[in-house]
Image (cartoon, rainbow, N blue to C red):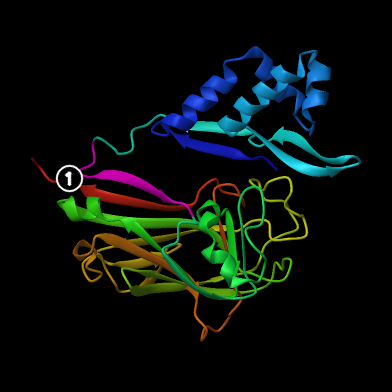
Amino acid sequence: MKNTLHLSIYDTAHISNIAKALSSEQRIKILKLLDNNVLNISEIASKLQMPMSSAALHIKILEESGLVITQPVPGIRGSQKLSGIKVDHLSIDLKPSYNVDSPYQTAYFSMPIGNYFDFRITPPCGIVSESRYLGATDDVSAFFLPDHSTAQLIWFTQGYLEYRFNNQLIKSSKTVEGIEFSFEACSEAQGYNNEWPSDITLWVGGKEVGTFTSKGDFGGVRGYQNPIWWSDTLTQYGVLHRLFIDRSGCYIDGIKTSDQTLESLKLTQSDFLLFRIGIKPEAKYVGGLNLFGEYFGNFSQHINMKIDYTPMTP
């Protein structure tokens, strides 16, 4: 299964790092060497007949670009660091972020899943970064750790996570035509269970806007983005879900779930745009929630918000 990284021309820093990584013939050779191989620095240096210090520097640059991932794994004489390909395909959207022939423009925002403003959850639960578990599993106190902002996968049984997006654009726009939230999620079972339904509810601006049923906690096939150390026996990936709000109502994955509209949500009356995702205790299927970040699951993204709007004229 291939891992594709999609970038916009406006992802300037990421594209610059990738361009730097691919500008070296030696680093291209390393990428070819790592095709279907996982190697340590010593093995890379030996196979390409280069000093270990040079190999380490090249790997560091490839890691910074996001093309290669390095993880510690247990070895005969302690742990060793192994490097492998993280991205098999790369695409860059060179189009502007809005259609110049359209009467409105489009703005994009990304909220890391660890940047929750508030939460209320019940175990079993857990939180991990790209490289390790954050605190102990099934311990709610882990969600209070300072480094929770680095989370790349969060799971819990019931409750919610609440995020607050900056609302300046909505307040300063002449007209907002539509708002879309997208995120990768699935149910939460012990290990994984592909047939484990869970009713996941969404709120915007403090008002409930709909519930959808996740069909399972998906595993058995490794998630594209998952780090090397993440066990194959655990949750692997979710489904990319979309919530769209316009003047006619709220739609989750294309199905209308609420009559709440851009107007009734009164989004211009607050300095932030509240987005909440959770499992209600009275739901028919209280099957928990896995929420995936940029470096877990199948989709290289956190919680994305897209706003179609008409700018104020000077």
Residue 22 falls in which quadrant of the image? top right
In this view of the protein, can residue 177 be seen by the observer? yes
Relative to 102, say whether 176 is above or below.
Answer: below
Percent position (x, y) of residue 143? Answer: 54, 65
Relative to 96, say whether 248 is above or below.
Answer: below
Relative to 200, say whether 90 is above or below.
Answer: above
Percent position (x, y) of residue 66? Answer: 58, 34
In the picture, measured across the screen, residue 51 lies left or right of residue 113, that is right
Relative to 157, say whether 295 is above or below.
Answer: above
In this view of the protein, can residue 93 be seen by the observer? no
> How busy is the neighbourhood of tag 1: few (under 14 within 10 Å), some, or many (20 plus)?
some
Q: Nearer the viewer, residue 253 or 174?
A: 174
Q: Nearer the viewer, residue 72 or 83?
A: 72
The residue drawn where x is 57% and y is 58% is 239
Q: Amino acid at mark 1?
A: Pro
The residue drawn where x is 53% and y is 74% is 121
Magenta segment: does it hold 286?
no
In the rendered image, which residue does mark 1 sit on? Answer: 311
Quadrant containing the C terminus is top left
Magenta segment: does it hold 103?
yes
Number of numbered tags placed on the structure image: 1
In the picture, measured across the screen, residue 190 lies left or right of residue 243, that is right
**Label 1's element?**
loop
Residue 124 falls in which quadrant of the image? bottom right
Q: Which residues are magenta?
A: 101-112
Percent position (x, y) of residue 50? Answer: 77, 13
The residue drawn where x is 60% and y is 66% is 155
